[in-house]
Image (cartoon, grey):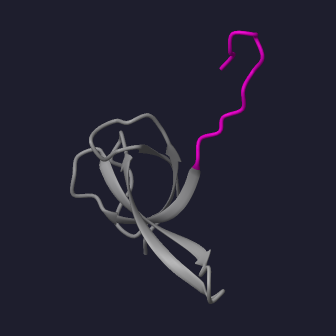
Amino acid sequence: MADVSGTVRPNTRKIREGVVASTSMDKTIVVRVVDRVRHPRYDKTMQRTGRLYAHDASNDARVGDRVRVQETRPLSKLKRWRLVEVLDRAR
């Protein structure tokens, strides 16, 4: 995408990887994303789990799949991500 001056800006949208937790909704998946952060005082590494609502246009993902999602414009009240690709299928 070119801006006013004609230069091409890089795509700065966030990309996350996680595991599909739910596919109950139509064209929407819930992805569990694990984020590792250091505790500010104790310097212990902690795991924080977030839930991202992602748009899956083709209803391709299944529960347990490892997927890659990308940030996008707001698609609904909670959906701000879209499915990019399925990395691993659930066994």
In the figure, 52 relative to 46: above or below?
above
Residue 20, image x, y percentages: 39, 64
Residue 25, image x, y percentages: 22, 51
Q: Could you tell me how many numbered marks the image carries?
A: 0
Q: Quadrant of the N terminus?
A: top right
The magenta stretch spans residue 79: no
Per the rendered image, the range of residues in magenta is 1-14
Residue at image location 52% in from the left, 79% down from the top: 47
Residue at image location 40% in from the left, 70% down from the top: 64
Describe residue 7's horizontal placement relative to residue 30 as left or right.
Answer: right
Residue 23, image x, y percentages: 28, 58
Residue positioned most to the front: 41
User: Taking the image as drawn, is residue 35 in sight?
Assistant: yes
Residue at image location 44% in from the left, 45% down from the top: 81
Residue 51, image x, y percentages: 38, 63
Describe residue 35's horizontal placement relative to residue 91 as left or right.
Answer: right
In the figure, 25 relative to 18: above or below?
above
User: Taking the image as drawn, is residue 88 in sight?
Assistant: no
* Rendering quarter of residue 74: top left
Out of 11 and 41, give the one closest to the viewer: 41
